[in-house]
Each structure stands twice: as C-alpha cells, then as structure tokens.
Image: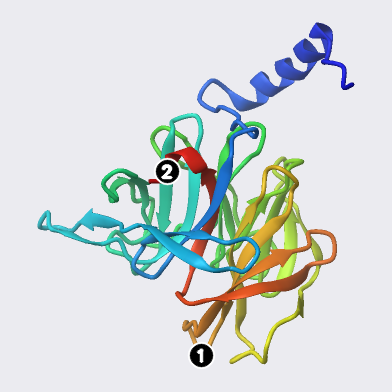
Amino acid sequence: MRRPPSVAWLVLAVIPLLAACGSDSTAPDMTTAVTLVAADRDGDVYTINETTGAATLVINTTTQNATGTLVDVGVVSSMLWVESTQRWWLGTGGNAECDGCIQTLNVSTGVATTLIQPGNNGISGLAIHPTTGAIYSWESDSTNELYSFDPVTGVPDTLFTGLPMPSSGTGTTFSTGGTLYVAADEELWTINLTTGAPAMIGQMTFTGFPAFNSTSLTVGSMATRPSDGVVFGVLKDGGGVNSTVVTYLVRVNLTTAEITNVGPQTELMDGLAYVPTSVLP
C-alpha cells in the first residue's frame, strides 16, 4: 500500500512552488478526467479519438466581427484550459477574424470573446506548465521569442528573444516533468525556462504514414496526456507554400523525435489540447 507523504515533505515541496509561481498561478488538477480536442479551420471544436484520430464536432464556435455580427472564429492555432481562472483559451491564427488574439470560449454558447490582441502574429504555441499553471507561448518568426502570459488578463511578457532555433513549426507542450518542448522545422527542441537556452533532441523521423504530398511537414500543435505523459500532435502535410492538404493525429516520442501516425483526419485540424471532460457539452 502506498504511504501518504509526510507533512514535513509537503511543506518542503510547497514552499519553493509558491515562490516560483506567485499568487496568480494555480497548478492544474492532474486527477481530473480529460478529453483530447482540436479545432478546424473555422475554429469549431472537435473531440479527437486517441486511437484512430477521428474527430467529432462538439462546439460550433462564433465571435463578433467589427459590426457586432456573429461570424466564424477562423483558424485556431492553439488552445488550452486555464485551471486557475476556469477558462478555455483560444489562440487564433494570423488570418482569423481576430488575428493573433487570445480569446476565451463560452462552452455553453460557443461564442469566443477577445481577451487580448498582443500583436499581428498568430498565437500558435500556447502551453501550460503541469505544476505551476504558468502559461507560455513560442513564436517562431524572425525573432524566435518565448513569452509568458498573465492567466487573468492575457497580457504577454517577453522572456527571451532571438533564440537560435529554426523559425518554422509551432507545436509546443510541456512534459509531465515540466520540460518545455517545441517542434520546429522537423526538429524537436527543448527550451530552458531559466536561461532560454534551446537544445535539439533530434531530427524528426516519420513512421506509419502513406506517401506525403509535400516535403513541407509541420507539427502544428502538441498536447501531453496528463495521466502518463504520452504526447500527441497534429502533423500538417503541406501541398505548397502555406497550404495544408491533410492533417494526421500523431504520437511524438520526446526522447527520439519519432513521429508515429495514429490516423488521418477528415477535417484540417490544429490547436490540439487536453481539456477537462466536464466542461464539454
């Protein structure tokens, strides 16, 4: 029988955690039942079958345009559930209705409301630390920046810029141990949150796929299953510059950078995330 931890051990564990997190971060409850979700090109949310990759529509999302009319959200590049505020975040793409925005999603109505628009680039790599609840995003462009976000206001803080990494690919996730992983230009990297130093795990290899349409292969989003640390991703098979022909649900090996096909998706997906099953309609 597993013995409960001593009070002394708990005190020693909690003190450094509180010092690191501050008062506005709350660690997510990793015992909560979760479901894998992703979004299509309109921003509609689907549950994803972890065995086959099949997608089932659960939330038809909308947002207000400049005239107050409800329209499609558009491309959602990243999603996450913020435990500390009990809100579902959508990180929109550069060509969404609100481009490069963080929006909060009302699950009951499907309406997304803009929390903040940090800039004109897409919010493509949202990831939440498994123990502190701190929120990060990797922006792969000419500046290669790592941000943190205030969980209440969404205001970003640039932590590091000019990181010596490829500026292509946006999949970002934490391991259950708290290491930040980034998929960039068919390579898997880690970023040290203290120093900003990146380290390449390896060149991606691809297992179990049919012939690709293009050499443009991008792991657009990643999500870590809290129960066992298995990492899933969405692999985008490109048919040309800035195009995607098909997406696959894949498993990502964080040790070897092997990308294993789970199954193709009938809709073009992105923004893979785990959310509490209880918040789904």
Which residue was labeled with disc 1? Answer: 240
User: In the picture shown, does residue 201 fall above or below 112?
Assistant: below
Q: Nearer the viewer, residue 34 or 222?
A: 34
Q: Position of residue 148 (x, y in %)?
A: 54, 42
What is the number of the mark on residue 192? none
Which residue was labeled with disc 2? Answer: 88
In the displayed orientation, state which residue is furthest to the left.
Answer: 67
Residue 155 appears in the figure: no
Label 2: which secondary element? strand
Q: Nearer the viewer, residue 201 or 255?
A: 255
Q: Is residue 265 left or right of residue 101?
A: right
Q: Nearer the viewer, residue 128 or 199?
A: 128
Q: Single out the mark in the foreground, 1 or 2.
A: 2
Q: The disc labelled 1 sits on which kind of residue?
A: Gly
Q: Nearer the viewer, residue 166 or 205?
A: 205
Label 1: which secondary element? loop
Ranked by sequence position, the earlier of labels 1 and 2 is 2
Q: Residue at x 71, y 42 (%)?
A: 227
Residue 41 appears in the figure: yes
Q: Position of residue 33 (x, y in %)?
A: 59, 39
Q: Residue at x 54, y 67 (%)?
A: 141
Q: CA distance from mark 1 to mark 2?
A: 32 Å
Q: Residue at x 66, y 38 (%)?
A: 130
Q: The disc labelled 2 sits on which kind of residue?
A: Trp
User: In the picture shown, does residue 25 fall above or below 209?
Assistant: above
Q: Residues within 10 Å of mark 2 (few under 14, many from 20)?
A: many
Q: Position of residue 30 (x, y in %)?
A: 64, 34
Q: Position of residue 124 (x, y in %)?
A: 50, 60
User: In the picture shown, does residue 140 fall above or below 181?
Assistant: below
Q: Residues within 10 Å of mark 1 (few under 14, many from 20)?
A: few
Which corner quadrant of the image does residue 199 belong to?
Answer: bottom right
Q: Is residue 166 left or right of residue 45?
A: right
